[in-house]
Amino acid sequence: MSTTLPYAQRDASAASGGVGRGSGPRARARKRSDRRRRVRRDVLLLALMAPGVLYFAIFHYGALGANVIAFKRYVPFIGIVDSQWAGLAHFARMFSDVAFWRAALNTLEISALQLIFYFPIPLALALLLHSISSVPVRRFVQSVVYLPHFISWVIVVALFQQILGNAGVLNGILADNGLSIVHIIGNPDAFKPLMIAQVIWKDAGWGTIIFLAALHQVDEQQYEAAAIDGAGWWRRLWHVTLPAIRPVLALLLILRLGEILSVGFEQFILQRDNVGPAAGEVIDTFVYYTGVLGGDWGYGAAAGLVKGAIGAVLIYLANKVAHRLGEQGVYR
């Protein structure tokens, strides 16, 4: 049977605005009306979202245009437009700078330690919290482990110095018992493990939020079926829990790889002078001391631009690997 409409019916359909096909002036007017109605309905939510959108638009996306100073001999008193072009001179200097490579090596070492020791901790903590059957106890423990995240790094560093410093609580106890004191704060060899311990103490509890949300989506009947089949706790974890939250693990791992060169500016700027640049310099502090304090803005911007480019490439490659493994990743 032919599906071609007679001329009279096609003319009537066009006159009615093509409602059945979703085209025509009436359909477009209806869509505009629906959009206006949704905006009026959600005007409060949009108003609450506006400050966050403006923040990212101005300080994250808008600031990207200032990266042009990485290719200029930028002088603040002259301005970006009038500063002379330097081409790739800053990048050539950076790749031959021993101080930059030292900061990059420290950053990679600390990032690797965070990936190995910090990344699994929130998952393990989420599994322990999820296994607590008493709701009041679980909520209390969650509140306790979340609390350090809201403490500023200034206070966290001060607490660690009061406990582990040469005149801290730990050395005071050792001295009272006739034992030799240990040098942790200010010891270059202990600096990197100390940084990882601080991150774990401060942010491990906060990192459990996404894992807990994913664990609550796991069907309890799967645990019951596995237990009936004789699977123990470890088997249920390996064959039920981890496969169910694998997409979340892949997503968080990809995002972590994108930030592998960002290990935390405030934490390191507060403690860099305790051990010196050889052990405490990272790329973020290198950019600060070179660009902001040293006045070499173009050189500092070049280092920051390289860091951002490497992070973008790592996200792209990790996302491709996730697609090959059957996961959605950050984007399709």
Image (tube, helix red, strand yellow):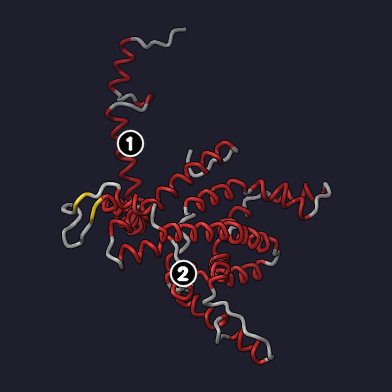
Comparing 113 with 39, the one in front is 113
Residue 7 shown left or right of residue 187 in the figure: left
Residue 121 shown left or right of residue 185 in the figure: right
**What residue type is disc 1 on?**
Lys
Q: Is residue 3 visible from the viewing direction of this image?
A: yes
**What residue type is disc 2 on?**
Gln
Q: Is residue 40 above or below residue 332?
A: below
Element marked by disc 1: helix
The image position of residue 214, as x and y in percent, is 60, 52
Snapshot quadrant of residue 54: bottom left
CA distance separating discs 2 and 1: 51 Å
Q: Residue at x 54, y 64 (%)?
A: 206
Residue 127 shown left or right of residue 41 in the figure: right
Q: Is residue 229 above or below residue 145?
A: above
- The residue labelled by disc 2 is 267
Comparing 78 with 125, the one in front is 78
Tell me which label, 2 or 1, sits earlier in the chain: 1
The image position of residue 203, as x and y in percent, is 54, 66
Query: Which label number is shown at residue 198?
Result: none
Q: Residue at x 17, y 52 (%)?
A: 81
The image position of residue 196, as x and y in percent, is 56, 66
Element marked by disc 2: helix
- The residue labelled by disc 1 is 31
Count of labels shown? 2
Q: Is residue 264 above or below residue 304?
A: below
